[in-house]
Image (cartoon, rainbow, N blue to C red):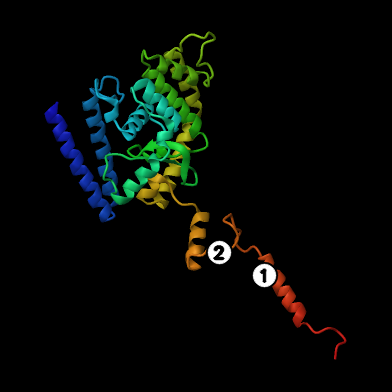
Amino acid sequence: MSDRLDQLEARIDELRAGVRRAMRVKDTATARALRAELRAAERSWDTLVTGGLDGSPRVPDGAPQGLVTVREQAHQALTLLGAPAQPRLIAAVGEAFLGGTLRGSQLTSLRRDEERSFASSPYGRPYYLCAALTDRLAPARGLLTVSTWPLERRMVGPLSPRVDFLTCAIAVARHLSPDPRAARLLARMARNIPGGAAGDLGPPDPDRVIEAAANELAVHAERDTRDRADLAERATSQLDDRARLFGGTTLITVAGAAATAANGGAPTGPPAGPYVLGAPDKGAGATAARTKTRNTPTRGRR
């Protein structure tokens, strides 16, 4: 196994260097192909290291939890779930399945740290914990994803929150372990799926949860896939690499920053908010009216 790991690690390093070279010369097609190959190599590396027993990323037996960083614990939980998730769910999965010690509050600033790392050294890490993107191509509040996922999976359309919840429920049911914390997590999720929970108060049936979630998922999946593909196409054409991972800037923010810069750094105009182009300035209109009144001669005056 050691020889295979060494080969994979050498290949991963080679692919990362290739991606950086392609991005420097703006060869996006080559970069996209190399990144896809890089993701496949990283998945093979993960499978080889964890043994591939059940497809879930696990901390090696006997490894002290203090040596597993918050970032890595979050990555393991998101990989198990396979969909964008909120910090509280990530922490619950880490605790129930991976023996982690995550708290939701620890993940609050993690995305900002990841963005700073990417800005200082683009693609310097095998993966980044990044934001899900809304239909405005802005970061979705409180949703974390993994940069190696396809862009479509990191987008959030109108049906995506429900689709992602069902996807996570299926993943939790498939990886259910004897740990009572895992059963409690699945029970909470099953209560929010029609037909997912039995009438009694006993432990949830994983097969029942999977079937109920899959039935509802079939109703939403086609439209959600189409919506996400449309959003991903927009993100690809409108955003640079950094914004595709961490979200773009809204038009209002851009307009406010441009106005501030044009004014020498001093804020201008009313507080930030949506403006309608061509709308009359009532203050300017009133000033002009007063000026016209003063300059107009009074009738009958000689």
User: Observer-nearest residue: 239 or 224?
Assistant: 239
Q: Residue 284 — which label?
A: 1
Q: Residues within 10 Å of mark 1 (few under 14, many from 20)?
A: few
Circle 1: element type: helix
Residue 153 showing in the rendered view: no
Front-lying residue, 255 or 211: 255
- At horizontal 38% and vertical 19% (from top left) the residue drawn is 174
Q: How many marks?
A: 2
Q: Which residue is drawn at the image coordinates 51% and 68% (left, top)? A: 263
Q: Is residue 53 left or right of residue 236?
A: left
Gap in Å between the C-alphas at discs 2 and 1?
15 Å
Does residue 10 appear anywhere in the picture? yes
Q: Residues within 10 Å of mark 2 (few under 14, many from 20)?
A: some
Counting from the top left corner in percent of width and height, residue 189 is at: 48, 21
The relative height of residue 196 versus residue 262 in the rendered view (above or below) is above
* Residue 143 horizontal/vertical position (percent): 45, 36
Residue 268 - label: 2
Please state which of residues 300 and 153 is positioned toward the viewer in this rendering: 300
The answer to which image quadrant residue 293 occupies is bottom right
Tell me what residue is drawn at x 25 percent, y 39 percent: 38
Residue 63 position in % (x across, y down)? 24, 24
Residue pictured at 45% horizontal, 35% vertical: 225
